Amino acid sequence: MTNIMQTGARGLLKGAAFDAADAKAQGIREDFPILTASLTKQGAPLVYLDSAATSQKPGAVIDAIVDYYENTNANVYRSIHRLGEKATAALESGRAAVADYIGAASSREIIFTRGTTESFNLLASSLCRRFEAGDEIILSEMEHHANIVPWHMAAKNYGVVLKFLPLNEAGDLELSDLDRLLNPRTKLVSLTHISNLLGTINPIGQIAPLVHARGALLAVDAAQSLPHMPIDVKALGADFLAFSGHKAFAPMGIGCLYGRQELLESLPPWQGGGEMISAVGLHGFSVNELPWKFEAGTPNVEGVVGLEAALDYMRRLDPTWIDTWTASLAAYAIERLEAIPGVTVHGAPRLRAGLFPFTLAGVHAHDLAAFLDRSGIAVRAGKHCAHPLSDKLELLSSCRASFHAYSTRADADALIKRLTAAARRGVIV
């Protein structure tokens, strides 16, 4: 039996502290041009509650990207003229910024990818070549597709065996089962930090020592956690960590795979061409050093520039504050939504981030999302890239509300008011 315990409920903002945070969030909205827009004929303000799918972008990020194209744009590493050297410096500045932000030991541990999905595809493709058929990888039932499908492909290609850590009815991982699943054939445990369906925050820092004690590696899906809370790969005990920039104020198409340097150096490259080679002949090639050996082709320099600006913006807001505020706002909304007849908020994990799924009895989630959209309220509807978890919860489809630093009590109240109207009406078409 493992001695891992879930951490207790954290302190959430109430009263005057909640009001003060709400005022701060209202000020933050002014940094985001799109949040001044209206999507309805009636001119209702945009209520953006889909930040778990992608965040909106502050002016600081937009300006950085425009400035890059107006003053820096050139190809990197290979163009030795002034602009080329400037673009290369911008790319490596972004790499150093990411390393600093997540507490990596070196910028060599930062591999730029298109996002979380590509990061896990890279990892599965390279890491599993070291494994033998019958070696085991432990995932959990709450993983989203980016941390499931690449491992399914690896199972087919390399014969590795996938096992899944279950979760209980509240939506917390059954950590006592981890001991049962871990065995000498376990090579990797790959878990999400925050469930993108239930919002469950998993105690990665407590899980890591047990995983390492059994000789396995730990990979962390930080797609939903890096945008909302401080991330320190050493404190987490992560051997690998993946995230997408676009959920954290950065542009789409940029993300990272962090890996401990000695591990990355031991892995083979996964794609060929571009900067991943150091020399090429007619009969072969030699592989470049870290981090470039995993970055084939021309990199997304614009994305890296935007990511650096986004991380700087996140740091100025204070990731701890973002975590506390969005979780408090979610708790505020959940308490009121659960009082509406017919509305169900699914899951009740011990620690929940600023997102949650909900349904209205007798109404398909897609219809409910369309109903909300007519009032300018944007939520996600569907299975949220987590089909196995939706199926386990017997959710054909659900709506998901997700908050970020710019979300306000007025946003939550707009959702509550509109859902109350939908519940009273019964039919929303």
Image: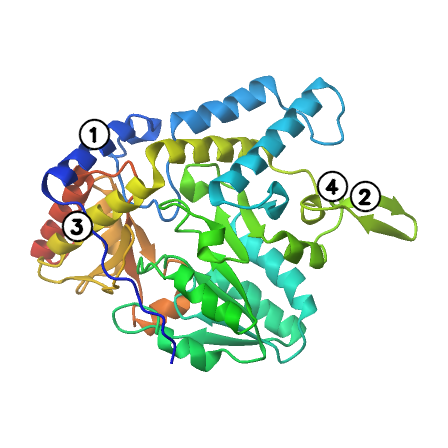
Rounded to the nearest whole Å, what is the CA distance between mark 3 and mark 2? 54 Å
Question: Which residue is located at x 46 percent, y 64 percent?
Answer: 208
Percent of width and height locating residue 27: 24, 27
* Above or below: residue 114 compared with residue 171: above
Residue 209 in percent (x, y) is at 46, 66
Three-letter code for the amino acid on which mark 1 is drawn: Gly
Q: Disc 2 versus disc 4: distance between alpha carbons? A: 7 Å
In the image, which is nearer the foreground, mark 3 or mark 2? 2
Residue 72 visible (yes or no): yes
Task: Identify the image's colour scheme: rainbow, by chain, secondary structure or one colour.
Answer: rainbow
| Residue 366 visible somewhere in the drawing | no
In the rendered image of this protein, does residue 130 appear above or below residue 236? below
User: Real-space Cα distance between discs 3 and 1?
Assistant: 24 Å
Label 1: which secondary element? loop
Q: Position of residue 28 (x, y in %)?
A: 28, 30
Q: Which residue is mark 3?
A: 333
| Earlier sequence position, callout 1 versus callout 4 | 1
At mark 3, the secondary structure is helix
Residue for badge 1: 43
> Please, what is the three-letter code of the amino acid marked with disc 4?
Glu
Check residue 278 in the rendering and tell me which mark sits there, or answer none.
Answer: 2
Where 38 falls versus 72 (above or below)? below
> In percent of the image, x 14 and y 47: which residue is there?
418
Res. 351 image quadrant: bottom left
Q: Is residue 205 above or below residue 310?
A: below
**Residue holding disc 4:** 275
> Disc 3 and disc 4: Cα gap in Å?
48 Å
* Left or right of 80 in this view: 101: left
